[in-house]
Image (cartoon, grey):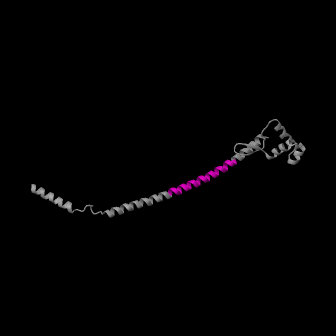
Amino acid sequence: MQVGLLTVGIIFIIIALFKPKNDGISEDKIEKMFEDFLLQIEIENEEILKKIKLTHTEIYSQLEKELRTLEKRVTEIESRLVTSEATSTGSYITPNDENSYQLNAKYEEVLKLYNSGYSIDEVAQKTNISHAEIKLILGLKQKGYKNV
């Protein structure tokens, strides 16, 4: 029995010595497979990056378009609001900037001419505004109304 075990042991040793170390796959094959794998990952990453850039560009373009549309609508609404305020209050004001209003240029001219010493008749003649309207403007201004 001991001789049988010794023979089996010697056979295993001989097989182990003559058996190829890498089971038929050479280091060159492994390296080539790894390089191919990395190349494939790189190609896929580039494709994904292109898709992301395209999507980003499309989204940015759409947002710019929507922003322009909204800005146009806001301008229209502001214009309607100023017109509505002027009609409902009877004061003819125009937007100067975001937070203030100025008198209608004609009405400013009336006040400027009158304060410079021109008579109501002269102011009416220079501005083509009726005497009654000039008197109304001057009367309201005299009573302290700011937005005549």
Residue under the image location 9 percent in, 57 percent down: 3
Q: In which quarter of the view is residue 82 placed?
A: top right
Residue 139, picture quadrant: top right
Report whether residue 122 is seen: yes
Q: Nearer the viewer, residue 24 or 115?
A: 115
Magenta stretch secondary structure, dominant: helix
Question: Whole-percent x and y of residue 105?
Answer: 80, 46
x, y percentage for residue 6?
12, 57
Q: Is residue 85 part of the magenta span, yes or no?
A: no
Q: Quadrant of residue 10?
A: bottom left
The relative height of residue 8 versus residue 94 in the rendered view (above or below) is below
| Along the viewing direction, whichever of 115 and 43 lies nearer the viewer | 115
Residue appearing at x 15%, y 57% in the figure: 9
Q: Residue furthest top?
A: 143
Left/right placement of residue 1 relative to residue 71 reads left
Report the quarter where the N terminus lies: bottom left
Horizontal arrangement in the rendering, residue 107 relative to residue 30 (left or right): right
- Quarter of the figure that contains the C terminus: top right
Residue 91 in the figure: left or right of residue 19:
right
Residue 120 in the image: state x and y as whole percent: 89, 42
| Residue 60 forms part of the magenta stretch | yes
Q: Residue at x 20, y 60 (%)?
A: 16
Residue at far front of view:
116
Does residue 1 appear anywhere in the picture?
no
Q: Position of residue 107 (x, y in %)?
A: 81, 44
Q: Which residues are magenta?
A: 51-76
**In terms of depth relative to the viewer, which is nearer, 83 or 35?**
35
